[in-house]
Amino acid sequence: MSFMWSPATALTLSTLIMSAMMALSSTNWMFLWASMELNLLSFIPILMSSKSHQETEGSIKYFLAQALGSALLLTSSIMMWTPYSILPSTMPTILMIAILLKLGSAPCHFWYPSVMSSISWISCTILSSWQKLAPLAILVFFTSQTSKSMIPLMAGLNALLGGVMGMNQSKLRTIMAYSSIGHLGWMMSFMLLDKPMTSMFYFAIYCSLIIPLFMLLNSMNLMTSKQLSKVTMLHPTTQLSISILLISLAGLPPLTGFMPKMLAILMLANYNTPLIIILIMGSLMNLFFYLNIIINMMMSNQNMNTSLMNQQKSGSLILIMSSVTSMGMAPMIML
């Protein structure tokens, strides 16, 4: 999708960034709710930027899911501090469900793969990275002060569901949606140890991998795994970059994606061994469909198109930097 830069676009993006920062710096639930509502309303025009029927449908689904989450968030946060509220013990659970719904995490993930498959790669990049920053920060810092009985269940459910549901998908954006759900399970596992900053560190590494990957897929306008034969018409650097980014997302050593997973395994080794096994099983299923994408890309026998290679020369440096960054060797570029 070609993004049309205009004063309205600049205002929308600035509001999107500012509202997320306001949510992160909120000191009360009412201000937090208002910030996330502003964030929701500023993201809708980005979803509908191409004015296609598919993206309009995706934006409506996103709005309905987020509006439900906002309503639950506002209601539960008010009832938690009301002296004579109904069922006060259930309000923290409802508040957590509201945050999970806004985050697109299992078991409240029903809208996330559907919206991801309906919108453009640019919108998918924002939805999978920036739009998850505020809800994830609220979740990891909120659960550190509440009961941890639900965290192993949520982490294991995210990991398994992200792996199982992603194995029978053909659309790349749906595959990446279930991959994101699987990675949420690893991020939630750090909450058991009261390590919210470690969860945010995992999220930062995840964003550093998916942003160049989604930009590469957007530049080639790839929608399904069958279209990966188009990759061979470009420079071999493109194939290498996509392969390394996917394998790094799977968490294979010595790539960057392996580091936070290994950290989670070491930290949980003496705390919750069954959860580690469930997380590794989900990660192995993620590796299955990542390798399926790579094999489909490598097995194509089409010849290289020289004109397309010349068009991609300007992006070669970006492709090389993205692949090198995924290996954790970014500082060595300057040497």
Image: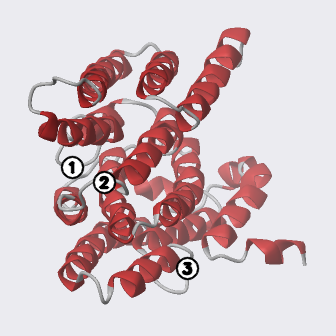
Tags 2 and 1 touching, CB below 8 Å: yes
Q: At 26% across and 26% down in the image, what residue appears? A: 65
> Which badge, 2 or 3, is on the more N-terminal residue?
2
| Residue 114 position (above or below residue 16) | below
Nearest the camera: 36 or 217?
A: 36
The image quadrant that residue 96 belongs to is top left
Q: Secondary structure at mark 2?
A: helix
The image quadrant that residue 283 belongs to is bottom left
Q: Amino acid at mark 2?
A: Ile
- Quickly name the residue at label 1: 106
Task: Give the residue furthest to the front.
Answer: 83
Of discs 2 and 3, which sits in the foreground?
Answer: 2
| Residue 18 position (above or below residue 311) | above
Badge 2 crowding class, 10 Å Cα cut-off, few under 14, some 14 to 19, many 20 or more, is: many
Query: Could one spot residue 165 in this view of the protein?
Result: yes
Q: Amino acid at mark 3?
A: Leu
Query: Could one spot residue 3 in this view of the protein?
Result: no
Query: How far is mark 2 from mark 1, CA to CA?
Result: 7 Å
Nearest the camera: 136 or 279?
A: 136
Badge 3 crowding class, 10 Å Cα cut-off, few under 14, some 14 to 19, many 20 or more, is: many
- Quickly name the residue at label 3: 255
User: Could you tell me residue 58's position as x and y percent?
Assistant: 32, 24
Query: How far is mark 2 from mark 3, CA to CA?
Result: 21 Å
Of discs 1 and 3, which sits in the foreground?
Answer: 1
- Quickly name the residue at label 2: 181
